[in-house]
Image (cartoon, grey):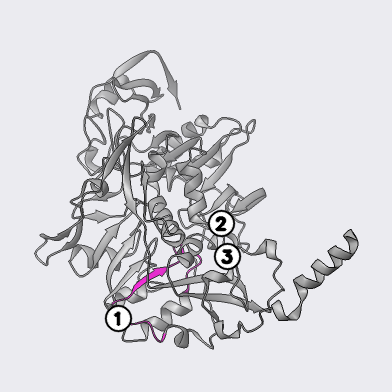
Amino acid sequence: LLHRMLRLWQGFRVAPRFLHTSSSSKIYKDAASAVADIPSGSKLLVGGFGLCGIPESLIRALSKTKVNNLTVVSNNCGVDDFGLGVLLQTKQIKRMISSYVGENATFERQYLSGELELELVPQGNLAERLRAGGAGIPAFFTATGYGTLLSGGGFPIKFNADGSVAIESEKRETRDIDGKNYVLEPAIKGDYSLVKAWKADTRGNLVFRGTARNFNHPVATASPLTIAEVEEIVPAGELPPDSIHLPGIYVHRIIKSNHTEKRIEKLTVDLQDNKTKAKDAGALKRERIARRAALEFKDGMYCNLGIGIPTLASNYIPPTISIELQSENGLLGMGPYPKPGFHDADLINAGKETITTLPGSSTFSSADSFAMIRGGHINLTLLGALQVSSKGDLANWIIPGKMVKGPGGAMDLTSSGNRVVVLMEHVAKGGVHKILDNCSLPLTSVRSVNRVITDMAVFDVDPEKGLTLIEVASDTTVDEVKKNTGCSFAVSPNLVQFS
């Protein structure tokens, strides 16, 4: 009887009258037809991270229309002549909602000159606000951004032509929960979503590849009409159900990209086999900091490394320990740079550099990546800074009126409760102090830094007592450290040297 019932159930599952076969209406002939009805004034959610996983054909098609006055939500805005940067060039974007301006000179120039409105959002908050929008959650509390310009209000969203502020951000609601301060962040929903995937089937189920999943997953869920650009379309049933990353319920239109450039923003390869080039003084400073920073790694740690010197620290991991490197664009188990000729446009780190994976690596969405960070699953964060205060305040994302890089993932990483170690040159150009009683630049986070490593010294940071010098460089004296530090500090009785 049990076998008969099982056969009947199997027959019911495959009965033709229950199979949906009319999904061909989701497939559009080209990008132009897929975006043809997007009107001016729309709010577009666009996937991608840097240039990795961007819907380049859909963006290109949109740039050839007369659509304008757009609000675009995306982690960043491409580069000057590619990706969303093209829509900046054509002046089709009125407002950007992003976490990172980066190296896009057009983006920065249009914002500072008052041509473009800009809402900056910490990267993890951006991912979670999109995820919340797609999940019907109107708002949520997070520690990220508390005590900063982005939560306190007053960030210039738009400048007038004379440099005065035309529109300022509003103050966020905050709340003390179990003795910790949190900020209320509203969900983000859009009118249309543009995403990029590797494969789709005719029902709209999507599979991503490598780190190209990034923001595409949460973006796809957060609007009533999602258009997916893919490299291959297969019949329904060809993708195993367990391999599908995004169910077709979220996808309404599909186009196959016939020409995908998949430009790499920062092609970086492993040249260790080549003859070592002579290093200038700056490179030697950075190498010293990175080499000392590698001693912060402990066996079994999960670590996040910021752009620049922190990434260099991975070159000096002691051979006796094993750690896993997490990249906030959606990779756990990051490997070294690829050998020349073996790079992959779908595998980049948070600095947009090409990288490799290791046995046991995993990839995931930006929302999942920051859930790991926000949830306290990362043990150690190494990142750079413009300034650090004696009590551990950090500033590293903006110089008002001059440089706007954006918070990226730094606010999320430094507010999650993991150990935070800042790596930076001890002074800025002209000998300007970077370690101060109080930061003069807008803060990234409040009292979050546990240790500071520079080319001259290593300080431990106590949020109440301040700095303690625990190590000094072998070619530096304590007096030289004092001269180059903009605040007082204690000296450990167990002071040692590092080289």
Magenta region: which residues?
Answer: 36-55
Q: Which mark is residue 40?
A: 1
| Disc 2 residue crowd, few under 14, some 14–19, many 20+, Cα 10 Å | some
Q: Residue at x 59, y 52 (%)?
A: 274
- Tell me what residue is drawn at x 30 percent, y 81 percent: 40
> Helix, strand or loop at disc 2?
loop
Mark before the other along the chain sequence, 3 or 1: 1
Tell me the kind of residue under disc 3: Leu
Depth check: give the residue in front, 475 or 119.
Answer: 119
Q: Is residue 49 magenta?
A: yes
Return the residue nearer the eye: 15 or 390: 15
Residue matched to label 2: 269
**Which residue corresponds to mark 3?**
246
In the displayed structure image, the side of residue 464 where residue 227 appears, left or right:
right
Quarter of the image that includes the N terminus: bottom right
Q: Is residue 65 visible?
A: yes
Q: Does the magenta portion include 324?
A: no
Location of residue 19 with respect to 412 vertically, above or below: below
Q: Is residue 42 left or right of residue 400?
A: right
Q: Residues within 10 Å of mark 1 (few under 14, many from 20)?
A: some
Residue at 43% over, 48% down: 307
Whole-percent x and y of residue 258? 56, 83
